[in-house]
Image (cartoon, rainbow, N blue to C red):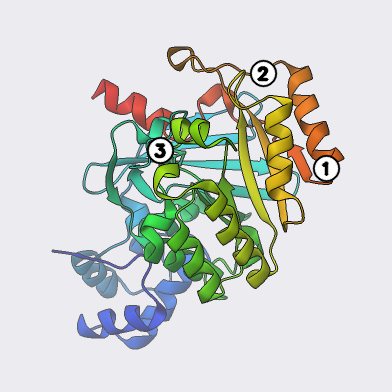
Amino acid sequence: MKKEIFGLTPEELQQEFVAAGLKKFRASQVYQWLYKKCVFKFEEMHNLSKADITVLNEKFTVMPANINILTRWKSSDGLTEKLLLELQDGNSLETVLMHHDYGYSVCVSSQVGCAMACAFCASGLNGCVRNLTSAEIIMQVYLFNSMIAPQQVSRVVVMGSGEPMLNYDEVTGALKFLHREDTAFMSYRNMTVSTCGIIPGIERLAEENIPINLAVSLHAVKDDVRTQLMPVNKGFPFPSVIAAAEKYARASGRQVTYEYILIKDKNDSPEDAQLLSNYLKFKHASVNLIPANPVPEKGFERPPAKRIEGFLRILQKNKINATIRKEMGKDINAACGQLRAKFNDNK
Ligand code: SF4
């Protein structure tokens, strides 16, 4: 069986190449092609000898060269692109590229499916199939890098399918890899991990002092409503999640972002806004309000614009740093899990 080399460190790559009878320096050449030039086929690496290309093709594979793109969707404004990818084991995952004023960001998935079963999310419909490897997470960024070359992705948000804190080692391994000077050289400040509130993961992140941005999906501040929207609230009640996130904010010096989907008549009242303010007052925190995409089967509707603005005003009056999220890619189902769910339905 061929050995997968995507995501190996230079030292690991060198070991593999030497064991295959190749010269040491070939490892640094191939490493450069992969992570600086985004070339994934050995035959396109022009400084390799024909004999070495033959050996490489016999013994090794490079994940991005073998990934099947099942669907490629671009939003009508051209700013958002979503890929549905078929992994080598036949599973599929979604990944999204967004073009902002400041550059490109990618929203990566961390698991195939998700076990968290949030009521508003298609990723949790069939549970978690498996964790992604760090190479599969890095690959999502590099696929887009090869498409937009010579530009490159400058930000990563781990906010696609899956709960990253339940795949902690592979997710942080991927982020550390992308931070390396000899790969994407991406600053930790440009990386965000979004959790539904897995406290041990938040605590570990604080202990390990990896200064990335933390986002917490909060979405409700009444216990029964949050449990209904996010069953994880039963195991990790949100006041304890906020306490753990605040510890992370103090330890890292990075402000925590709380995501809050506004759903009509569920969590969008002035009382909710005041409660949210009370919980976050004096915290190193900001709030990202996300007007819900209507899901008629679940009775979810978007609140009227006036109600959304009123909610925002209450937060601001309480000196909570809050914004309403700019929507991107709505016409291509860019919300997590939607495309994969559709694909699985049609299989
Ligand atoms: S919102 Fe996130 S944590 Fe919740 S089911 Fe979807 S992917 Fe999982």
Which-is-in-front pick, marks 2 and 1?
A: 1
Disc 1 C-beta below 8 A from ligand 1: no
Q: In the picture, residue 13 is in which quadrant?
A: bottom left
The answer to whether residue 326 is seen in the rendering is no
Mark 3 lies on residue:
231
The residue under label 2 is: 303
Tell me the kind of residue under disc 2: Pro
The answer to whether the residue labelled 2 contacts the one labelled 3, judged by CB atoms less than 8 Å apart, is no
Is residue 309 visible to us here? yes
Who's the residue at 36% across and 48% down the image? 111
Q: Secondary structure at mark 1?
A: loop
Most extreme residue toward the right is: 317
The quarter of the rendered structure image containing the C terminus is: top left
Decide which of 227, 327 is in the foreground and name it: 227
Residue of label 1: 318
In the rendering, at what x and y percent does residue 296 appear? Answer: 48, 12
Q: Nearer the viewer, mark 2 or mark 3?
A: 3
Q: Is residue 106 left or right of residue 62?
A: right
Whole-angstrom CA distance, mark 2 to mark 1, is 21 Å
